[in-house]
Image (cartoon, rainbow, N blue to C red):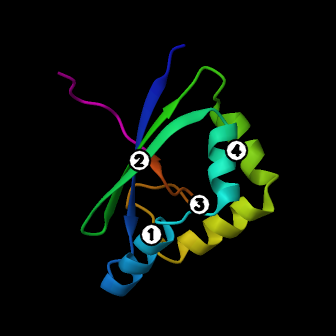
Amino acid sequence: MSSKRYCYALDLINDEELIAAYKKYHENVWPEIIKGIKDSGITSMEIYHVADRLFMIMEVNESFSFEMKAEMDANNPREKEWQDLMWKYQKALPCAKPGEKWILMDRIFKL
């Protein structure tokens, strides 16, 4: 069973109270969101935080596709509710296209 790793970046609104609230939500992510993540073929997901920057590492199995995940999310009202709520705390990176949130990062070094 092979897996792939994807890394993403996103910013938070630079406000201590908002950042604390965002982190609090991630202590107890809604069960429907966790189920959607797992059902899409994502086997591992970690989000790291420094200042107002987020970094996400996502590992997926061979059944995962970005198109399938997008379709699953579009058909899940709870996912939309979660994303709308999280957007109150997040802000797009300066390089993001309109409507784009998490930006896929390019690996530039591996040991």
The x, y position of residue 41, in whole percent, is 63, 32
Circles 4, 3 touching at the beta carbon (< 8 Å): no
Q: Which-is-in-front pick, marks 3 and 1?
A: 1
Inter-mark Cα distance, 2 to 3: 23 Å
Give the residue at x 30% y 69%.
52
Inter-mark Cα distance, 4 to 2: 19 Å
Residue indicated by mark 3: 99
Q: Quadrant of residue 17?
A: bottom left
**Which comes before the other along the chain, label 3 or label 1?**
1
**Which comes before the other along the chain, label 2 or label 1?**
2
Amino acid type at image mark 2: Glu
| Above or below 58: residue 95 | below
Q: Quadrant of residue 63?
A: top right
Give the residue at x 79% y 55%.
76
**Which comes before the other along the chain, label 1 or label 4?**
4
The x, y position of residue 6, in whole percent, is 44, 35
Q: Residues within 10 Å of mark 2 (few under 14, many from 20)?
A: few
62, 9: nearer the viewer: 62
Residue indicated by mark 2: 46
Amino acid type at image mark 1: Lys
Our reading of the magenta stretch's main secondary structure is loop
Q: Which-is-in-front pick, marks 4 and 2?
A: 2
Residue indicated by mark 4: 70
- Compared across the picture, whether 32 is left or right of 13 comes to right
**Which comes before the other along the chain, label 4 or label 3?**
4
In which quadrant will I find the N terminus? top right
Magenta stretch contains residue 105:
yes
Q: Which residues are magenta?
A: 104-111
User: Regarding mark 1 in the picture, which secondary structure is present there?
Assistant: strand
Residue indicated by mark 1: 91
